[in-house]
């Protein structure tokens, strides 16, 4: 079987994790929360 | 339906139920407002669905890049990269509630099911344009006087929002019923068209329109969890190609962008040449 490296995937996943942490430190999770706890009128076809 | 396919549908259904288990919301016409909404779910699942416990990553992405304060969505982009790099489109095949709905509709008998058609492959590129224009550029650059952008994909296209949020909330909430207009009719039209097309074509929304599938598809070739083909075991029987409902030939196109990791090819292989996992 042809050997396939999982390293690129792991490196990308680590970058993703780092971005997530940076985003959380910037308070973006709060922005997501604010949007998600109110009925999104655009999403349901009203706004 | 074979046992493994049934098992996959059970996983899809269990995940849909788990991530939409605020059941009281369906009776009260309200949505969940607890701390889990800080987190994104991996699949396309409207956060305005009365049962939704988490946030839709595409909705959340547009909310952050469209906000005057942030403009760059590091948290949600990181989440998408993290999930994509680990699993590729495994989420599409196993963890997306709207994917499950389309698959179940496709089981309804119809005189002529379309596996492919002229322009099919080209049309599949359209989902990248949907992501770029409706989920990225318009929310980022078309803003109001406060610098706030709209979630354009959710607003003009997303059928999951209409089905999971729009219909139950409008049925349960008189105030919302009074506010219905052209946009609701437009989105209902899109939803009905996609649901009807799902009977004829396998997962039409996933193939041609889904921005989340477009993002995950980029990671398919390098994802940690992906298919491996043992060429020495492959007898070129074509069984995998025959069962692939995304229209791929797994021997030549293993882990291509269109693969949703449903495992049908792996299950159909008579020699066990296709394996799934992280080991070479």
Image (cartoon, rainbow, N blue to C red):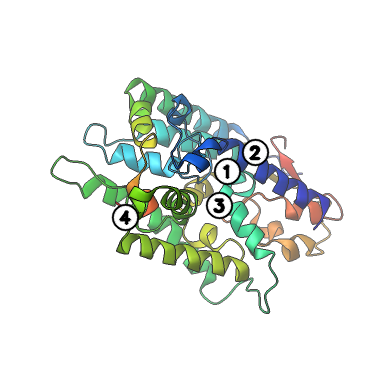
From mark 1 to mark 4, how far is it between C-alphas?
A: 42 Å
Q: Which residue is mark 3?
A: B98
Seen from the viewer's position, the closer of residues A6 and B220 is B220
Q: Which residue is mark 1?
A: B88
Q: Residue at x 21, y 36 (%)?
A: B68
Q: Earlier in the sequence, mark 2 or mark 3?
A: 3
Seen from the viewer's position, the closer of residues B90 and B160 is B160
Q: Is residue B22 left or right of residue B275?
A: left
Is disc 4 placed on a helix, strand or loop?
loop
Could you tell me how many numbered marks the image carries?
4
Rendered image: mark on residue B225? 2
Q: Which residue is mark 4?
A: B178
Q: Within 10 Å of the Cα at label 3, are there few (<14), some (14-19), or many (20+) other Cα atoms?
A: many
From mark 1 to mark 3, how far is it between C-alphas?
A: 17 Å
Q: Residue at x 51, y 74 (%)?
A: B119
From mark 2 to mark 3, how far is it between C-alphas?
A: 22 Å
Given the current orientation, which residue lies at the most extreme front position?
B174
Q: Within 10 Å of the Cα at label 2, are there few (<14), some (14-19), or many (20+) other Cα atoms?
A: many
Q: Earlier in the sequence, mark 4 or mark 3?
A: 3
User: How far across and how far down the image is residue A46, in percent?
Assistant: 32, 53
Q: Chain of mark 1?
A: B
Q: Is residue B229 left or right of residue B57?
A: right
- Tell me the mark number nearer the camera, choosing from 1 and 3: 3
Q: Is residue B191 left or right of residue B141?
A: right
Contact flag, marks 1 and 2 (Cβ < 8 Å):
yes
- Tell me the mark number nearer the camera, choosing from 1 and 4: 4
User: How far across and how far down the image is residue B134, in percent?
Assistant: 34, 54
């Amino acid at each position: 079987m042809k050997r396939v490296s999982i390293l690129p995937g792991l490196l990308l996943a680590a970058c993703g994790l780092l971005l997530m942490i940076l985003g959380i430190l910037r308070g973006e999770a709060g922005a997501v929360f604010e949007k998600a706890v109110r009925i999104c009128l655009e999403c349901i076809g009203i706004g | 339906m074979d046992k493994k396919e049934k098992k996959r549908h059970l996983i899809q259904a269990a995940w849909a139920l788990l991530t939409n288990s605020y059941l009281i919301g369906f009776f009260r016409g309200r949505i969940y407002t607890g701390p889990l909404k800080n987190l994104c779910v991996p699949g396309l699942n409207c956060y305005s669905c009365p049962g939704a416990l988490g946030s839709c990553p595409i909705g959340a992405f547009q909310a952050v890049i469209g906000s005057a304060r942030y403009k760059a969505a590091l948290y949600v982009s990181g989440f998408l990269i993290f999930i994509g790099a680990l699993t590729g489109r495994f989420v599409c095949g196993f963890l997306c509630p709207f994917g499950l709905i389309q698959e179940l509709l496709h089981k309804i008998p119809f005189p002529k099911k379309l596996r492919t058609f002229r322009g099919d492959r080209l049309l599949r590129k359209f989902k990248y344009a949907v992501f770029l224009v409706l989920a990225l550029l318009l929310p980022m650059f078309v803003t109001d006087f406060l610098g706030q952008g709209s979630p354009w994909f959710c607003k003009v296209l997303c059928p999951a929002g209409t089905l999971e949020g729009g219909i139950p909330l409008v049925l349960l909430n008189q105030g919302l019923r009074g506010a219905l207009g052209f946009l609701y009719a437009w989105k209902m039209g899109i939803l009905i068209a996609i649901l009807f097309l799902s009977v004829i074509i396998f997962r039409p929304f996933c193939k041609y329109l889904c921005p989340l599938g477009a993002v995950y598809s980029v990671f398919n070739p390098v994802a940690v969890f992906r298919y491996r083909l043992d060429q020495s075991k492959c007898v070129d029987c074509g069984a995998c190609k025959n069962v692939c409902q995304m229209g791929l030939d797994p021997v030549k196109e293993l882990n291509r962008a269109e693969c949703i990791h449903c495992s049908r090819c792996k299950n159909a292989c008579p020699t066990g040449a296709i394996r799934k996992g992280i080991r070479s």
